[in-house]
Amino acid sequence: MKFVYQWVLFLLFVPQLALGFDHSYKEWGAFLKTHVSYSGLGSRVDYTLLRQHPAQLDLLLYNFSETPKKEFDQFSRDQQIAFLINGYNAYSIKLVLERYPIYSFDESAPDSHSPYAKPFIALFDQKLSLDDLEHKWLMGKYEDLRVLFAVNCLCISCPNLAKQPYLASQLDRQLERSIELFLSDGFKNQIRRHHLFLSELIDLRERYFELADGSIEPFFKKRWPKAAKLIAEGRFSYRKKDNALNDLLTP
């Protein structure tokens, strides 16, 4: 029965593969709608349900991995960014499923590898890592700070895993929305008693903020002026990242 289910899913994908890459991300959108939910401002993934039907994700990743570099080069800039963000998030989930059940995303790779450094992504005739997609491709090529809030490390403290695919036609709005949700989550970022508590993720990626604007202050001045003022006054510190998996079963 399981084989029949996988075969039916494959047949559904064949027409799409013949026509080239689907920039509407119809199948990825259906996947996210089924498996991602929100608890307050934070997103959760139903890995238990997903583990029962892994073929759907495998076929989604096949569609990513079979996209030739020559075809990717013909995408518009926003299509390329959306492709890499969606691919990063899908491959992250795959990495978790390979070792699930686990408590933390850090456990999704053997002890010899950081999950971010593990070269397991078959793309453009290479074996790439999540670090490659984020740092060499997304930030290295496009230098858009906003993508740091769209790629997902699947931890409680991470930016949310969006319930909708990133689309080239909506990319600007979606990236700004991902930042808005992250900054407004009091568990991750908060002002209390005239002091700003920021997510450690900002600190870990500080070099990108410094390269873009010299410091993190200009980024916040545009989106959270009160926070920017406290940064300018030196009234801020970083909250330690919670590495617990963003599992629906996590309290």
Image (cartoon, rainbow, N blue to C red):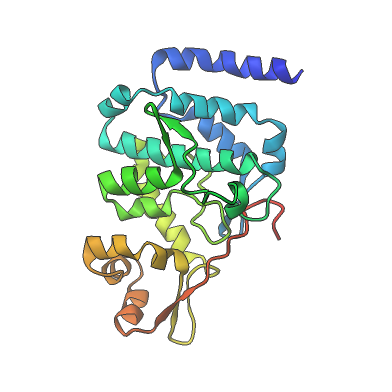
- Most extreme residue toward the front is 112
Q: Name the image quarter holding residue 141.
A: top left
| 164 shown above or below 41 | above
- Pick the front one: 92 or 34: 92
- Pick the front one: 226 or 160: 160
- Tally the numbered discs: 0
- Pick the front one: 39 or 75: 75
| 35 shown above or below 191 | above
Task: Please state the horizontal and vertical placement of residue 104, each as a whole percent of the image.
Answer: 62, 55
The residue sitting at 57% across, 38% down in the picture is 94
| 179 shown above or below 222 | above
Residue 37 in sight from this viewpoint: no
Q: Name the image quarter holding residue 219.
A: bottom left
Q: Name the image quarter holding residue 149.
A: bottom left
Task: Please state the horizontal and vertical placement of residue 27, each as a whole percent of the image.
Answer: 53, 28
In the visual, does 77 lie left or right of 129?
A: left
The residue sitting at 43% across, 78% down in the picture is 237
In the visual, does 108 lie left or right of 19?
A: right
The quadrant of the rendering that contains the N terminus is top right
Task: Please state the horizontal and vertical placement of residue 175, each as a whole percent of the image.
Answer: 37, 50
- Most extreme residue toward the bottom is 193
Residue 103 in sight from this viewpoint: yes
The quadrant of the rendering that contains the C terminus is bottom right
Task: Please state the horizontal and vertical placement of residue 35, each as a whole percent of the image.
Answer: 63, 40
The residue sitting at 68% across, 50% down in the picture is 102
| 70 shown above or below 205 | above
